[in-house]
Amino acid sequence: MDRQRIKELFCGFGCIVATVEEWHNFHRHDEIQFGFYLDGPVDYQLGGQVYRIMADECVLFWGAIPHLLRSSPQNNRQYWVTIPLEVFVRWGLPEDFMHKVLNGQLLKADHKRLRELDRMRLEIWEEDFAEGEEKYLEVIMLAMESRIRRFGLESEVGQTESTAVTLQDRGLFTKVYDYIAKNFYQDIKVTDIAEHVEMHPKYVMTAFKKSCGQSIGKVITMMRIYEAQRLLTTTDMSVIDIALESGFGSLSNFYNCFKKHCGKPPNKYRLED
């Protein structure tokens, strides 16, 4: 499986209620994705990790990480909202919650009590989006923000005290993340990113780390690790080819970074998957 088989999608701000269809390829998009399945269990792969989603759970993750539906009960129904990154960060959500999402984790929360309410409101939102009524857009956005805030309180990271993320330059933050997500497999440097956003490298590095708690270099490495995990678990490519395909300049650098982040070398990770 090569990079061209990751399907690039543009979802925008929207809502999808539909029968689950089988996906043969990984796909990615820049929006935050929130939703649930009517039936379970569903196995969903985000980067190199497979998550099991039960019928009474809702999930949220950043779609920039390549993801794939691996298995689902027949005739299952899916309910999703997609939220542009710039909208998501504008809400000033708790810092630990934001950092988990933007560092590639899939978060889950029980939604038994809200199951029927979630079904009804997503069906209404889908109708509103389909009709294209601009007058409903702000109302939907406020309702989505409220639901995501509650999810943040009830998810795995919702029980700790935290402060809201303050982004002084949200446009810069989203531009940098978007550039990294699309170019991490190349030999990119902070100077390349700074040139792309037309700002001084030191300012870009400082503003980015203040926004998400991670350095630009660490986020680039994270993206490369997720891609390497994906290739290790879904292809029979050699380890050296995976290292180069994921953006690591050398095999030794790949081994060191992979073991540091995953706790085991890539060859052992593949054998134990």
Image (spheres, grey):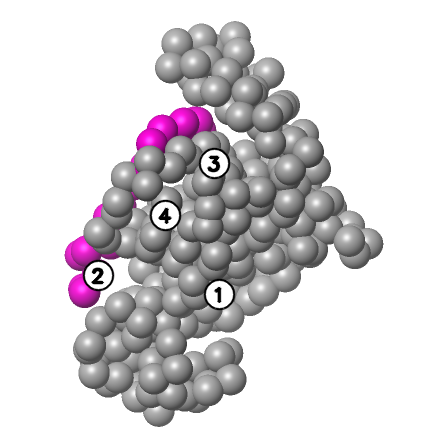
Is the Cβ of the residue at disc 1 closer than 8 Å to that at disc 4?
A: no
Write down the residue under mark 2: 3
Q: Is residue 185 magenta?
A: no
Above or below, 86 relative to 239: above
Report the amino acid beneath label 2: Arg
Q: Earlier in the sequence, mark 2 or mark 1?
A: 2
Label 2 secondary element: helix
Write down the residue under mark 3: 38
Q: CA distance from mark 1 to mark 3?
A: 34 Å
Q: Earlier in the sequence, mark 1 or mark 3?
A: 3
Residue 153: horizontal and vertical position, in percent?
73, 45
In which quadrant will I find the N terminus? Answer: bottom left
Residue 186: horizontal and vertical position, in percent?
28, 67
Residue 139: horizontal and vertical position, in percent?
59, 16
In which quadrant will I find the C terminus? Answer: bottom left
Q: Which is nearer the eye, 6 or 218?
A: 6
Write down the residue under mark 4: 72
Write down the residue under mark 1: 219
Is residue 184 visible to the viewer in this orientation of the structure? yes
